[in-house]
Image: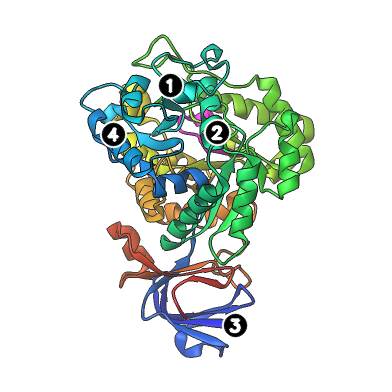
Amino acid sequence: MSLLLTGVTVGDAADRAVHVVDGAVAWVGPAADAPRADRTWDGGGALLTPAFVDAHVHATATGLALTGLALHGADSLRSALAAVAAHVAAHPTGTVLGTGWDETVWPEGRAITRHDLDAVVGDRPAYLARVDVHSATVSTALLDRIPGITDLPGYGADGQLRLDAHHAARQVAYGSVDPVQRATAQRATFDAAADLGIGCVHEMAGPEVSSAEDLAGLLRIAGEAPGPQVLGWWGELAERGGLDVVAELGLAGAGGDLFCDGAFGSHTAALSTPYADRPDTSGALRFDTGQLVEHVRACTAAGVQAGFHVIGDAAVDQVLAAVAAVAEQLGRDAVRACRHRLEHVEMVSPDAVETLRSLGMVASVQPAFDAAWGGDAGMYAERLGVERALGCNPLADLSDAGVAIALGSDAPVTPLDPWGGVHAAVDHRTPGAGMRPFDAYDAATHGGWYAARAEHAQGPLAVGAPAHLALWATDLTLSGVLAQRARPTCTGLLVAGDVVRGAP
């Protein structure tokens, strides 16, 4: 079957057409010269682009936030608890699951405690993740379901959990989600992504954030009907069976959210020097370097991409040292062929940037983090001090050094918002740290496929490339959208030539 998209603007050229045959781009050129096709779709002057790729997503948690209790808009402790109370009234049974609260912007100046939560939810189990999803407040009823929770690192008697205690609580809380609720949440994420022109999401699964069952269900649902493609990663060390899950489910890589540290907001990102507002801690590394060397070696020997969650500079340096050690053992070419990934990589030195480049690694970054917390007066500055804060997320340095970059949202940490992510990458809160507009756009489209080792060599609109395409309701060219920081509405989406949104 063939489809002709005609009367569209491609890049900065108006009145163009794209011929799609058997799911791939077969021809691009002036509409007047277009070949015949089985079907024709008149774009009416819309902008046609490659579909976006969100390179870091948690689909089930995102869907639960979309369909349930999202606290991102709460501007005070009081309003957050009011939202919880309203949710409890509307959903009188089951575990209360919420995410997105951020005490750093609240006038009360403190986080939710379990006593606050118990007063609202009563004897129901409840789990409310902080916005960075690296700590949470839970109710007494949930604590009572977790044997030995009080002995785990990160336990707080006030119900505020970090580190191992948080991971244990998250597993129990999300383990209470039944298959119907899970599938509903996953479909909600697919629908939201398609509405935004996202043709592919990178699902960052793992034993500390979801389950193999959750990931298998997600992949199954994604294959049942036309929609955004899902590429999966599993964040578990090879020594603990991580590569077995990769092989069993046919995943893109072994890593992603393999947590080597935590997050700035929860004081768990691993720093080389202490936090400015908590000089008693520098965060914590989750693994010994030797464990990471063994993981990278096993992945590299198997030709599998490894990936790591790293935010603080100590975690970044530890992983780079591990990858460099494997390059010495197995050869730099073998390491480069795997395109091992760093997720977030927010605090990275010039030496680390050069190591990333030389080892052929990918920086999977979230520009919305800088938009939300960067600059000289945001959460980064509070946690790290102004000097270190302004050095976070050095996107221009990574881009200028030739490091491969892919953009993502880390949804539900920040919302699915591909145009917003592109614009945030350009309009960095630190002057001079932002990317050039077309570089940012490329990182949000082609960069995601490159990060998955699935790019088309000549680019996403070249003849032979899979037809992952989006139509946008705007009179602007692509240059105009980028220059004006526009966020046009998606009116059509094709994934591998299948129509997901719009009607030809």
The Cα–Cα distance between marks 3 and 1, rounded to whole angstroms, is 59 Å
Residue pointed to by mark 3: 2
Left of 286 or right of it: where is 239?
A: right
SS at mark 2? Answer: strand
Magenta stretch bounds: 341-352
Residue 244 picture location, percent across and down? 76, 39
The Cα–Cα distance between marks 3 and 4, rounded to whole angstroms, is 51 Å
| Badge nearest the viewer, 4 or 2 | 4
Residue pointed to by mark 4: 80
SS at mark 4? Answer: helix
The Cα–Cα distance between marks 3 and 2, rounded to whole angstroms, is 42 Å
Residue 416 picture location, percent across and down? 42, 50
Residues at circles 4 and 2 in contact by the CB criterion of under 8 Å: no
For image coordinates 56% across by 31% down, the residue present is 171
Q: Residues within 10 Å of mark 3 (few under 14, many from 20)?
A: some
SS at mark 1? Answer: helix
Image-quadrant location for residue 373: top left
Residue 302 picture location, percent across and down? 78, 41
Q: Residues within 10 Å of mark 2 (few under 14, many from 20)?
A: many
Mark 2 or mark 1: which comes first in sequence?
1
Say if the magenta span includes residue 175. no
The Cα–Cα distance between marks 2 and 1, rounded to whole angstroms, is 30 Å
Reply above or below: 296 against 150.
Answer: below
Residues at circles 3 and 4 in contact by the CB criterion of under 8 Å: no
For image coordinates 34% across by 44% down, the residue present is 90
| Badge nearest the viewer, 3 or 4 | 4
Residue pointed to by mark 2: 309
Left of 468 or right of it: where is 78?
A: left
Residue 70 picture location, percent across and down? 36, 42
Residue pointed to by mark 1: 140
Mark 3 or mark 4: which comes first in sequence?
3
